[in-house]
Image: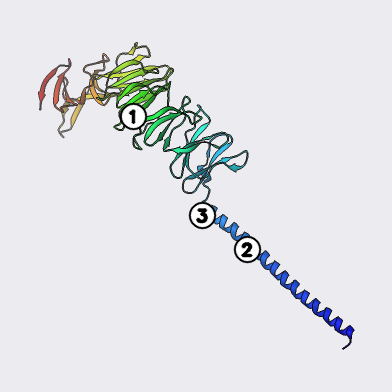
Amino acid sequence: MSKAMKTKRTKLRKCVKNSKKLKRLAGMVIKISLAVILVMIAFKLCRSFYRSVINPRNYWNDDNISETITARAFSGSRFRLYNEESNRYTSKYLDWVSGYSNDTTLGVFATLDNKRGYFDTKSGEVVIPAEYDYAWAFSEGLAGVVKNGKIGFINADNEIVIPFMFDCPKPGYMLDYIFREGHCVINDLEGKCGAIDREGNWVLPQEYLYFEHHECQDGCWTLVDSVGNMGLLDAQMNWICPPQYDKIVVWGYPEFIDLVDEGRMWREDAHGNVLIDFMFEYLSELNYPESIDENNDVDYHISDYAAYRVNYDWGILNLKTGKPLTPAIYGEVTMISKYLFSVECSRTLHDYFIDLDGNTVSVSK
């Protein structure tokens, strides 16, 4: 074989080898490309499955916290804070968000491990880390928080203003622990309530069963003492009505107060002036049996009297005069004749008979 032929054959072999290498390289590129495409498809399918089945969005439970921040809801009653302006999530998954108020831009959030902190309702960023066991909305510059079983109060910079010195009741027995007109109601482990000022000093001791704040013009409080009597305080915790009434109902604009004591109900204005000297919650006309027909059916006659109710007890009212014949101190009132009423004592359950002058006629056990 000539030298020229050998050279040509050698070049041909090299071309064949190079061609095989190119084919192998092209095959590897195609395989890698297919693998990448399959991985991307699998990733998208997994993400779609995760979002639609495992962790779907519950759009109907979204909460618009502010003009810029939304609490986006996911499955499992979880939320994430989302900034609508920057189009990004500003928090991890949360158990809940709440506690917005006009007092500050801070809101409360709870992590999935049940810790509380505060976030900015304008930016969605965490401002006070989740380091508290319980937390309430800011009010008058302070927020009640719980750490190691004690209630204290912090400011918006997470500085302790009132030390952790109040026992925290069990869940279900907690109050809202927010300040109103400079005072906050705190209850102990037994449920007894008292009031503190912004320095943590006791204004009223923890010896009351219940407090309620009323949003009337100047603000006021009703409370119940240890034996069930109700009293009324102004916004500065000064007594308007001492705790000696069976019931107190506070109304708003214009301000007036309905008082119940010893079976009597009346209305006063905010200055203690009597507006209505006799009131009742419900009225039921009284009729008495007049005759019995041949079928033993009783015919009743319409009387001039009615039973009126005050705080679940009943009394007798003269409809002609509009004056009460008796206070509302009975559990039941019926009219058994033209001249006689039968009443039941609310406490002893004994039956009494009362005449048209309101006098007790007889007692039967």
| Mark in front: 1 vs 2 | 1
Q: Element under label 2?
A: helix
> What's the amino acid at mark 3?
Val
Name the residue furthest front.
3
Disc 1 designates what residue? 187
Q: Is residue 266 visible?
A: no
Q: Secondary structure at mark 1?
A: strand
* Foreground pick, 212 / 283: 212
Specify the quadrant of the image occupied by residue 291. Answer: top left
Q: Label for residue 53?
A: 3
Which quarter of the image is occupied by the N terminus?
A: bottom right
Instruction: Report, in whole angstroms, how far the alpha carbon at label 1 lies from the one at label 3.
Output: 45 Å
Q: Is residue 209 above or below residue 325?
A: below
Corner quadrant of residue 255: top left
Residue, disc 2: 38
Judged left or right of residue 314, residue 14 is: right
Height in image: 275 above or below 205? above
Q: CA distance from mark 1 to mark 2?
A: 62 Å
Is there CB contact under 8 Å for labels 3 and 2? no
Label 3: how many residues lie within 10 Å, few (<14), some (14-19) or many (20+)?
A: few
Specify which label sits upstream in the sequence, 3 or 2: 2
